[in-house]
Image (cartoon, helix red, strand yellow):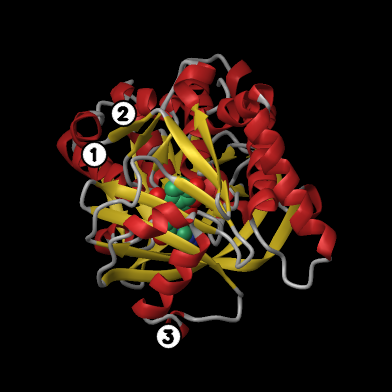
Amino acid sequence: MDTQVVIIGGGPSGLLLSQLLNRAGVATVILERGTRDHVLSRIRAGILEWGSVEMLREAGVGARMDAEGIPHDGTLITDADMVVHIDFKALTGRRVMVYGQTEVTRDLYAAQDAMGTTIVHGVGDVRILDLDGPQAAVEYTVDGKPHRLTCAYVAGCDGFHGVSRKTIPEARRQEFERVYPFGWLGILSRTPPVADELIYANSPHGFALASMRSESLVRYYVQVPLTDTVDDWPDDRFWAEFRRRIPSEAAARLVTGPSIEKSIAPLRSFVSEPLRWGRLFLVGDAAHIVPPTGAKGLNLAVSDVFYLHGALIDALRGNTAGIDAYSARALARIWKAMRFSWQMTTMLHRFEGEDSFAAQMRRATLAHLAASEAAQRDLAENYVGLPY
Ligand code: APR
Ligand code: PHB
C-alpha cells in the first residue's frame, strides 16, 4: 500500500483528521483540489464549542487559539428592543471560544508542514475505487498527469461539492434537505465590536448577527433575499440595514467603517446517510450542511473527526468495531445539531411571504426564552455543544 489513509479535501475536516492520525503514527496523504491560498482565503464562522477547543489542543494546534481566541461566557438574543442574555457559564458550566475557522485552518497547515505530511494541491479528476476489496485506490491527476494511490481507508473530507459522497451509489444513499429562502450577507470590518458578546437579532426587517474576530475586527451579517448580490449592498446600505435590525441601545454604540470582505452565503440543512461505504468514510460538509445560525458547521466536522480518528486507528490495529459504529455514532450527534440549527434559524429569520402568525411565534418564543431558565438552559446546552 502507498499510504494508510488517503484524505480527499484539505479543509478543516481533512487537515484535523490527518493531524490526529499522524500523531498516532498513521500515514496519510491529503489530496486538495485548490491552492493553499484559496483554502485560506475563505472566511467562515468563528465560534468553537469547548469540545472543539479541546480537540484542537489534543491535536497540538491549540497554542495560537489559546493566545488569540476570546472565550465567551454567553450571548445575546434579541427581538427589536427585547434583549435576552444567555449565560452559558452559569447555565451549563461551559463556554465557547471566538476564533475564526480560517485561523484554525492556517494553524493546521502549519502543524502538518512541521510534521512533514504529504498534502497534494491542485488535484483533479479524483476517483475513489475498490472500496469493497482488500485495499482501496484513489486515482487523480495533477497538471493533467495521472496518479494512483492504494490505501487501507479513504476519508471523504471534500465538502458539499466534493466527489466522495457521490461515490456512494445513489440508490444506497438517503439525502435529507431543507433549503431556506434567504442568504446571509456577511462583512468583515476593522472596527471594534458593538457588544462584548455576539448578538443574534430578530427584527421586523429580518435577522442580523453581530459577531467578531478580535477587539478590532468584526464579522457582521444581515439576512438578504437569495436573489441579492454583493453589488446590491454597498457598505452604506449594509450599515443602515444592520443598524435598524439590532436593538437601539446597541445601534447607538455602533462604529462603522469600510468593509474588507463581503460575501453572500445561502442557508441550507442537508444530511446524507450513511457516512460509510466499505472503505470510504464521509466527514464534515461532505456529509452534512447546517445553516450558520447555530455556529455548528465546523464543530460538527470536529466531532465527526473525533469519532473517526479513533476508529481508524483501532481498525488499522485489527479492531473494526469503531469503524462499524462510526456512521451511527456520528449521525446521532449530527441530527441533534441539525435540529438546533433549524430551530435557531426558524426562531430568528423572517420568511418572505409568511403569514402574520409567524412573526408572533418568533416573538413569543423569545418572550418564553426571556422568562424561562429551562428554555435558556436548553439553548445554552446546545450552543456550547452536546457531549461527544
Ligand atoms: N478533490 C479534492 N479536494 C476537493 C474536491 C475534490 N473533488 N472537492 C472539494 N475539495 C476540497 C475543497 O477545495 C475544500 O478545500 O475539499 C475541501 C473541503 O473543505 P470544506 O468545504 O471547508 O469542508 P470541511 O473540511 O468538511 O469543513 C467543514 O467548513 O464549510 C465549512 O461550515 C463548514 O465550518 C464547516 C467546515
Ligand atoms: C461568525 O463569527 O462568522 C459566526 C458566528 C456565529 C454564527 C455564525 C457565524 O452563528
Do we see residue 275 in this rendering? no
The residue identified by callout 1 is 112
Which callout, 1 or 3, points at the residue further toward the start of the chain?
A: 1
Q: Distance between the residues labelled 2 and 1?
A: 9 Å
Report the mark closest to the observer, 2 or 3.
Answer: 3
Please identify the quarter of the rendering in which residue 23 is found: top left
Spot the residue most to the left.
114
- x, y percent for residue 36: 26, 58
Pick whichever, 247 or 201, lies toward us.
247
Report if the beta carbon of the residue with label 2 is closer than 8 angstroms to ligand 1: no
Q: Distance between the residues labelled 2 and 3?
A: 44 Å
Give the residue drawn at x 28%, y 35%: 70
Report if the beta carbon of the residue with label 3 is closer than 8 angstroms to ligand 2: no
Do we see residue 306 in this rendering? yes
The residue identified by callout 3 is 231
Pick whichever, 258 or 337, lies toward us.
258
Report the mark closest to the observer, 1 or 3.
Answer: 3
- x, y percent for residue 24: 33, 20
Q: What element carries label 2?
A: helix
Residue type for callout 1: Gln
Pick whichever, 56 or 312, lies toward us.
56
- In the picture, the quarter occupied by the C terminus is top right
Q: How far apart are marks 1 and 3 (CA)?
A: 38 Å
Query: Circle 2: is it few (<14), some (14-19), or many (20+) Cα within 10 Å?
Result: some
The residue identified by callout 2 is 22
Which callout, 2 or 3, points at the residue further toward the start of the chain?
A: 2
Q: Is mark 3 on a helix, strand or loop?
A: helix
- x, y percent for residue 106: 24, 47
Depicted 4 relative to depicted 212: above or below: above
Give the residue drawn at x 42%, y 70%: 263
Which callout, 2 or 1, points at the residue further toward the start of the chain?
A: 2
